[in-house]
Amino acid sequence: MPMTRFRRLTALTAVAGALAMASPAGAMIDGDPPEPTVDLPDLKVSALAVSPVGGDWSITWTVVNSGAGSAAASTISFNGGGGMAASRSVTSLAAGASRSGSLTIPRTADCYVAMNVTADSGKVVKETNETNNPRLAFGVLPPCPARYRVTAYSFKALDESGIDWSGSDEPYWVFNSVGTAGTAASRASQVFGGIDTDDTQYFAPVDSCVWGCGVAGAPAPFGIGLSVQLWEQDLGHVSETLHDTASFFQQAGPILTAAGAPPWVGTATSTMGKAMDFILGWAEDDLLGTNTYAFDAAGLAAALPARGGFSDTRIYQSDDARYSLTMQVTRVI
């Protein structure tokens, strides 16, 4: 019995040893060992200013490496449109280090510039974040006229159309806008499905711009005129509704009189009333509400003496529906 017990223990020990020796080999077969972690840099433009000096735009900039690893030499680019472009070399940057510089670019006839500046514009540096390299700054030559943008922010169904329990609304918006000559524009939003009472819907950035679309906005020396319609899609065609609405809106004309916005509102309201009557004669969609109004130049200047913005909320309603629409009026320059 003692000998038998000894042999059994020896055998178990041998098996355990074989398993222990096999484990490292098995790990090598299952996969390669993980690569060591490499600290990466993160280049971005941390400071940027553009100002007029003589016939040039003077640009001061700083590029910082906010990552944990060092960054090789790279290039910073400057683009203001209209041929205003330049680039500069940036030496290698240790983690946390920065480089600053300045340059001048000849100014065009415009009294402002939207200068886009991009760190590592050649994409030669592998970074932890490749999306934060650009930065935008405006340069303004006094007395450059203010420039504005109007965007749709959100809407709320205060009371959906029809009987609430019978189904949801599928609303869409038609935005018409005008300022100086040649700026009249109309567009339709997407159709928002499944909207019930108390629902709030936010406009996506690509679907939000109403007037002054573009990074630098647009001047409004005579004010900004707007006419907005809310429709509920049934069996109609959004493109046809938009086409006819835009055709009538063009007849309201730009805001160009010395009196500015008030006379235009009267003309535009009458014109858009005729437009709605015409469209409802053939449209299979339901009109849930309409508003035609304007921001006059003096009111804009008083509300926005400097860059900034304010919200404007209005009610759109019909016999059995009530919605609110919030828009944002922003002074860009």
Image (cartoon, helix red, strand yellow):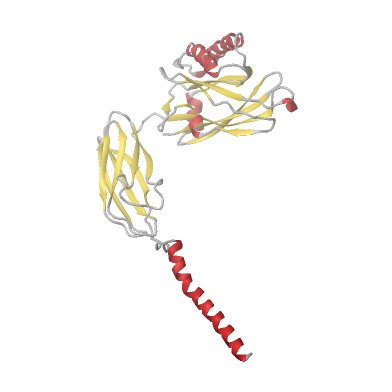
Q: Is residue 301 left or right of residue 154?
A: left
Q: Is residue 121 above or below residue 262?
A: below
Q: Position of residue 152 (x, y in %)?
A: 54, 30
Picture quadrant of residue 193 = top right
Q: Residue at x 39, y 47 (%)?
A: 130
Q: Quadrant of the N terminus?
A: bottom right
Give the vertical position of 219 relative to 132 (above or below): above
Q: Quadrant of residue 180?
A: top left
| Residue reaching furthest to the bottom | 2
Q: Nearer the viewer, residue 34 or 236?
A: 34
Tally of numbered discs: 0
Q: Which residue does the image show at 34% across and 42% down from the upper left?
A: 117
Task: Identify which residue, 98 or 220, lies in the foreground.
Answer: 98
Viewer-nearest residue: 117 or 144:
117
Which residue sits at x=35%, y=45%? Answer: 48
17 or 290: nearer the viewer? 17
Residue 21 pos. (x, y %): 47, 74
- Location of the C terminus (image quadrant): top left
82 w.r.t. 48: above or below: above
Give coordinates of residue 32: x percent, y percent.
41, 62
Q: Position of residue 200 (x, y in %)?
A: 63, 34
